[in-house]
Amino acid sequence: MSPIYVVGHKNPDTDSICSAIAYAYLRNKMVEAGKIKGVTEEAVPARQGDLNPETEFVLQKFGFDAPELVTDGEGKKVILVDHSEKAQSLDNIEKAEIIAIIDHHKIGDITTPNPITFINMPTGCTASIIKKLFEYCEIEIPQNIAGIMLAAILSDTVAFKSVTTTEKDKQAAEDLAKIAGIDDMMAFAMEMFKAKSDVSGKSPRDLLFRDYKDFDMSGNKVGVGQIEVVSLDLLADVKDALYEEMKKVKEEGGYHSIFLMLTDIMKEGTELLVVTDDPSIVEKAFGKKLEGRSVWLDGVMSRKKQVVPPLEKAFA
Amino acid sequence: MSPIYVVGHKNPDTDSICSAIAYAYLRNKMVEAGKIKGVTEEAVPARQGDLNPETEFVLQKFGFDAPELVTDGEGKKVILVDHSEKAQSLDNIEKAEIIAIIDHHKIGDITTPNPITFINMPTGCTASIIKKLFEYCEIEIPQNIAGIMLAAILSDTVAFKSVTTTEKDKQAAEDLAKIAGIDDMMAFAMEMFKAKSDVSGKSPRDLLFRDYKDFDMSGNKVGVGQIEVVSLDLLADVKDALYEEMKKVKEEGGYHSIFLMLTDIMKEGTELLVVTDDPSIVEKAFGKKLEGRSVWLDGVMSRKKQVVPPLEKAFA
Ligand SMILES: [Mn+2]
Ligand SMILES: [Mn+2]
């Protein structure tokens, strides 16, 4: 019997990987407990691409292998976590059978021919919703699963500094830290961010696509990437090469614009690198003019809440 | 301060009206209890159109007035219940701010610029999900709200005869009947269905649009209506006029096809009246040829699960 693949978005981040593992576990337990009828195939976590160094660090710390690589949805049963946009989902997602969606982003353009479970909440992280679902289903969270769920929350909320952070995320993280036996959450977050900041030996293309999403904004193809580091100094040597790479990708992919967020976790702000057909879009979106090839956006750390919505408005 | 309108689909059925009332109540209680931050305006139930006689009977029985009529979403804050399709939602829904969606249908084409709460479950009725949300939020259900929620479940599941019925619906109905003080659920359901079967004094157009939904099926405009009666005999005198009305509406609205389900609640089947540009679509969808202007579909009672999905496949 073919399994149900639980899979996050393209260019997976820590939430997409860890929530896939956690939800696959929860779903299998729910089937065991008779709480799910009908589609009861085994749930198997999957990933759409390479792990970033932060996620590698997290999986290794808690003893998980990388999930199976799955990029094409055709003929597969799938559960989507951490996204509901076709552009971020598996290739041929329209030929997959979508069993459920668990997400915390804006409602995307995926539709289904039948009623399914779709739970989207405006939390800072998918793992915070999955934590609630564990509670709701009265299923115990194993120590190592709690560890990776905590990591997902700390990663997505940048240790609660992101404006996307909610009380639910903080509460979930506290509970999960207890289960995982992690006494100093902030020290753990810093270890993760150091792993994430490691750009050594990576090609500009790898860095650009490490955490990169495509959007359709009023008919324009727009890419928004993000590199988070504990200090922008770490990117000084690669910034020129990143910019050249963005220009190349813009041509190859027929983009209207590509934005790359260079996010300084400690300073709590983002240098936004921009290649675009219309530089005025930056001022329209953020109220600040492009200075040369970039603009500094103080306090901006969230693509989802602080970059994509103003861009969508500016393009509308 | 302008309110948040909680509103079901066009041509409202009992679930769309009663779930709007129940969720507006729940949301206001959640705000009171401090469980919702941010958008805390008063939630007010609304309806997109006239009440059907079943819903009128239910609201009168439990002492509710008809919700406020709202048809245009422009500039309004809204919560959608019982639908997630643009075609079934308020006019100018793209100019409304959607705060949340609670639904039990296939995932529709509504998208949002920001993360919101979207809870969709494959239950037989929206009210069954709202019942779970009351429990989850630990908010007590008042007796009269329990009554209309029970009515919504009995209506949407045709007293648990519809294939859409799940264990969750049955459990919710039992709990709600206790709270509402209704000892004989089936007698109550029969009262409702008799009210619903009342077609006397209604124009063919009113009957056609009483429970009617538009769909976009692979680029074709398709309408699917349903009239549920305790016996098809009740419709014998109006069937000709209904068919003529369907032909008129097809021309006026530029439809590819209009399907009208004449559902016999007691016999548990549907006579499907059809006007279409392509009569072969009926056999493609249901494996049975059109006989004249209609086809009898044994066991078919659910538009959502037994009529729309095979039609969408046939059109694809
Ligand atoms: Mn996430
Ligand atoms: Mn319904």
Image (cartoon, coloured by chain):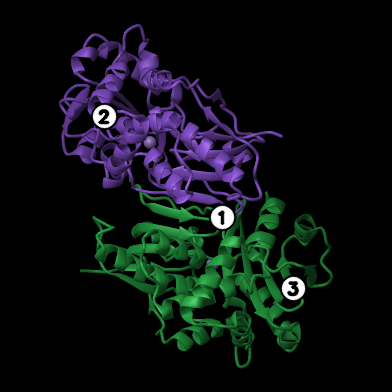
Chain colours: A green, B purple
Q: Note whether ligand 1 is within 8 Å of mark 3.
A: no
Q: Nearer the viewer, residue A86 or A249?
A: A86
Task: Name the residue at 50% across, 85% down.
Answer: A56
- Percent across and percent down for residue B18 are 44, 30
SS label for mark 3: loop
Residue A106's mark? Answer: 1
SS label for mark 1: loop
Task: Name the residue at 18% across, 27% down.
Answer: B295
- Percent across and percent down for residue A245 are 65, 79
Task: Write down the quadrant of residue A296 in the picture.
Answer: bottom right
Q: Work out how far the residue at label 2 is from the one at label 3, CA to CA, in angstroms.
A: 59 Å
Q: Nearer the viewer, residue B253 or A172?
A: A172
Residue located beneath label 2 in the image = B185
Using the image, name the chain to which the residue with label 3 belongs. Answer: A
User: 10 Å neighbourhood of mark 3: few (<14), some, or many (≥20)?
Assistant: some
Q: Give the residue type that dot 1 points to.
A: Lys
Establish whether labels 1 and 3 are both on one chain: yes
Residue located beneath label 3 in the image = A268
- Percent across and percent down for residue B135 are 43, 47
User: 10 Å neighbourhood of mark 2: few (<14), some, or many (≥20)?
Assistant: some
